[in-house]
Amino acid sequence: MPLKVVIAPQGFKGGVSALEASRAIERGVLAADPGAQTVLVPVADGGDGTLNALVDGTGGQIFRSIVTGPLGERIEAAWGVMGDGRTAVVEMAQASGLALVPPRRRNPRVTTTRGTGEIIKEALDKGFSRIIVGLGGSATNDGGMGMAGALGAKFLDSDGKPLPNGGAALARLASIDVSGLDPRLSGVTVVGATDVTNPLCGPTGASAVYGPQKGASGEVVEELDAALRNFALVIQRDLAQDVVDRPRAGAAGGLGAGLIVFAGAELKSGVDMVCEVLDFDAKVQGADLVITGEGRADRSTIYDKAPVGVARHALAHRVPTILLAGSLGPGYEELHDHGIAGIVCIADRPMTFEQSLRRTEELLEGAAQRALRLMWIGLGRE
């Protein structure tokens, strides 16, 4: 029987996409065993690469739209539809992402998710009946106010005036008017995909955990956390929904909460959702090995990142998983307790980060070949 290898990496940020990584790993597998059966399942966990993983993996189509960027400027953002022709995929980082804001201008007090809402509206205009929103990589902390505003909700201060963009304005929120909210939202299924479980507020909430990387000082973190708490209180009073302690509601600066309240969304583990959509469990049945990959393996990988999610699904079918990592960080050894059978660093010699980015595909190919040859030893193959 030929060896069956399922290849399921995520993208290597700044290097290659998940699909390109999959093809490079496949070349390495076939160089070691030309008779191997390979199954490519590029994955993501709700963050960077989710759009391409779902669209490429299903033979879908990419669109490009001009929308409002995180600082209010007009930008071009990619989104897409899956191969089923009915499921839109919105990667919020494309319209409201941290990478769109120069480091010196990062300020979650004023950044907005409005562009993400504009893409959702365009998906409604095109008649798609299911919308998946990837919640990683945000520049925002506005609780999804901008997103909901683009879809017709109004956020008013005590004088009945609309609030400006940004998370800081939520401290002055006095009422929410959803009478103009797009009625088509009630007829579609919206899923938020995320690799975090943080609640909206508190010491593990959106502001405290992710605010600093978006440019918030300690003082601003406290301001934004209080603003989101006021947001949650007004939602509870005006809309009879309690989101303050909901798991995953703090994703993308509280966009998770906004999707729940204004779009009726269900929030799911990003990698589990991607595996479900791509039918990973069916593809892994009868496999001898799963090879996954990511740019850096460390303790944070444990927290529902793509490699651990892939390994969890593979382990349910008694299939071992090898992780090919661009680099190893503190705590990577703990991954062995979370379904990863082996970890191979793809570097083949000392090199700079920039050099590794230029050689990512070549390094993945070589590491896959080495990993498979090591597996032969365990199988007693010549």
Image (cartoon, rainbow, N blue to C red):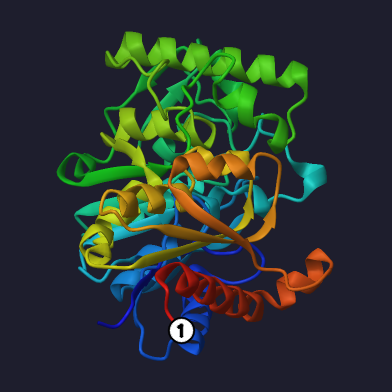
Of the pair 24 and 60, the residue shown nearer to us: 24
Of the pair 293 and 85, the residue shown nearer to us: 293
Of the pair 58 and 121, the residue shown nearer to us: 58
Horizontal placement of 37 versus 42: left or right? left
Residue 265: x and y in percent read 28, 37
User: Which residue is drawn at the image coordinates 65% and 45% (left, top)?
Assistant: 71
Report crowding for label 1: few under 14, some 14 to 19, many 20 or more residues within 10 A (C-alpha): few
Tell me the SS state at disc 1: loop
Check the image and name the residue furthest to the left: 187
Name the amino acid, label 1. Glu
Horizontal placement of 249 versus 183: left or right? right
Please indicate, yes or no, whether residue 113 appears anywhere in the rendered image. Answer: no
- Give the residue at mark 1: 382
Residue 223, quarter of picture:
top right
192 over 21 or under it: above or below:
above
User: Which residue is drawn at the image coordinates 62% and 46% (left, top)?
Assistant: 72
Counting labels gives 1
Please indicate, yes or no, whether residue 268 appears anywhere in the rendered image. Answer: yes
Residue 79: x and y in percent read 42, 63
Of the pair 199 and 164, the residue shown nearer to us: 199
User: Which residue is drawn at the image coordinates 33% and 14% (left, top)?
Assistant: 242
Residue 308: x and y in percent read 45, 47
User: Which residue is drawn at the image coordinates 59% and 37% (left, top)?
Assistant: 140
Residue 287: x and y in percent read 29, 68
Q: Quadrant of the N terminus?
A: bottom left
